[in-house]
Image (cartoon, rainbow, N blue to C red):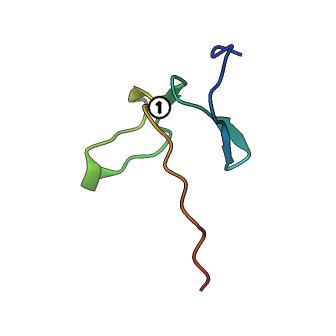
Amino acid sequence: MLNQNPATPVERFGWRFSPGDRVMASQNDCAREVFNGDLGTVLRITRRKARSS
């Protein structure tokens, strides 16, 4: 575990995310100019209620 003191973790897609975690894009998202292999850091987590379809 790289982030030893996670604050307010949230679980999505089978993974746990916390502010300060390092992340890597695994798919291209041309509209957001994010490409496979791009690295980033989680800055904040905004919790939203799930929408029903």
Task: Using the rendered view, name the quadrant where residue 5 is placed.
Answer: top right
Residue furthest to the front:
7
Q: Is residue 11 above or below residue 24?
A: below
**Numbered label tally:** 1
Q: Quadrant of the N terminus?
A: top right
* Residue in view at x 54 percent, y 61 percent: 48
Question: Which structural element holds mark 1?
Answer: loop
Amino acid type indicated by mark 1: Val
Q: In x, y percent, where is residue 27?
A: 46, 45
Task: Using the rendered view, name the quadrant where residue 31 is placed.
Answer: bottom left
Q: Is residue 3 above or below residue 14?
A: above
Q: In x, y percent, where is residue 21?
A: 55, 24
Q: In x, y percent, where is residue 24?
A: 49, 30
Q: Is residue 33 above or below residue 6?
A: below
* Residue in view at x 58 percent, y 67 percent: 49
* Direction from residue 13 to residue 35 in the image, left or right: left
Which residue is nearer to you in this view: 37 or 40? 40
Q: Which residue is mark 1?
A: 42
Q: Quadrant of the C terminus?
A: bottom right
Which residue is nearer to you in this view: 40 or 34? 40
Q: Is residue 23 above or below residue 46?
A: above
* Residue in view at x 62 percent, y 28 percent: 7
